[in-house]
Image (cartoon, rainbow, N blue to C red):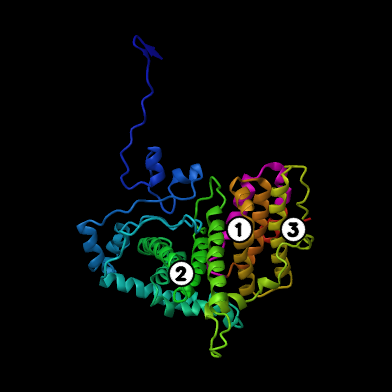
Amino acid sequence: MSTASGPRRKTKAFHHKSRGGCRTCKTRRVKCDEKRPRCNNCIRIGSEVCIYDAVKPTSSSKMALSGRSLSSPSDSHHSATDLARFNPASTPSPVSLGNMYHSIDSIDLPESASRRKLEMRLLHNFMTHLTNPYAEKSTPAAVLGWLQEVPKLSLEFDNLQYMMLACSGAHLLRSLPDNGEVANAHQVYITLALRDQQRAVANMNHVNSESIVYSALLHFLYSFSCLWNRPLDPYTPPTDWLHVGKGVRSVLVAVLEGSVQRNAPDPNNPNHKPSSAVLMVRNAPPDFRNDNLYSKENILPLPVLLDYTVDAPDYTAREAYEDALGYIGSMYEAVYINEPVFSLTRRFMGFSIFVPNLFIQLVKEQRPRALVILAMYFALMSRAQSVWWVGDIPHREILAIQRVLPPEWQEAMQWPLAVAGLITSYC
């Protein structure tokens, strides 16, 4: 419609300003719903990092943190908002080591009785449930040793202490999904953990290297566990978590290579021993040093996904696909020979650590072949559903992938659906 003065200008929809919105929404000048770990706008546009600026606590929020809001059941209506008022600068959305840290130096938790009680609860939960997440009674010490060492070592290193508390909060939230206090707590602690992990990595030495390794491994478990209730419609592949695996690898390589140099045999010190972190990471089964992770022979038992006439990827993409399939083939062999769950989960953790970066990019672009391979990975991972950070995440991801694949790729999904027990048979 036009008027005498010309075409009518389109009126922009009015909305109230969101002072607590994420940085992406503020940059785009759109209303942010402030949902955590990612707002709906970031999910819709595929933004992997949804960062919230630090909010300085008001005098009332400081009183809440230093007061009695967590001290008794009668005050439970306050405790749910206690840590929420202390707004972290980021969310628990996992991202790569290279960009997961940002400046949040102004964030810190004041000492209070309520904070001490909350941390005691999280510590007790970690020691009770997370120091041995496997059902097998014969789990070797090399597998559990680092987890059992975490509480003791966390007394010396804040990065590890905060990461331990964040993991415990994420675990507790599985059984208490509506508990606002726990939900807010693990967001605050993962923010503090990533900040202090950055500081530790920047000043890595023989004193703090073990805490860096343990914190990196806990961060991996935490980041995967956060997939359990993420929105899947519309589907966005979990590339944040895959990048965390690459970040963990960077930490492990830096510490392990440095430890090899620091822990070289000293002829003047016959009692010299390598650090326990290095030994436990290196010796825990399976030994990846003796596995041919990317062997093309590993692909033989898998469904044929080497027919490239449908999508015609270039040579480098083919190599990335086949490397990922080769690793999945080694996982399949481990499942086939019925390796114990503690060994399988270590292999599952290795997927995001060892697969090529290009494969992660192809997943991010939602290439159908990459998504099918990712579904195959989740199908094998469903064999570890008894582990707290796995649960029903594989089933949710497989079904979500199936929904977004075009018709010509549905047949390729029959194998992961069958292996995960989501259909009765596969021909």
Badge 2 or badge 3: first in the primary sequence: 2
Q: From the viewer's perspective, is the residue at label 2 or at label 3 nearer?
A: 2
| Camera-nearest label, 3 or 1 | 1
Q: Looking at the image, which residue is at 48% across and 75% down?
A: 210
184 on left or right of 318: left
**Crowd class of label 3 (few under 14; some 14 to 19; many from 20; radius 10 Å):** few
Residue at label 3?
425
Which residue reaches farthest top?
4
Which span of residues is magenta-colored?
Answer: 387-413
Q: Disc 2 marks which residue?
A: 204
Q: Which residue is mark 1?
A: 395
Q: Residue furthest bottom?
A: 270
Give the vertical position of 26 relative to 419 (above or below). Answer: above
Marked residue nearer the N-terminal end (3 or 1): 1
Quarter in which the C terminus is drawn: bottom right
Q: Position of residue 379 (x, y in %)?
A: 66, 60
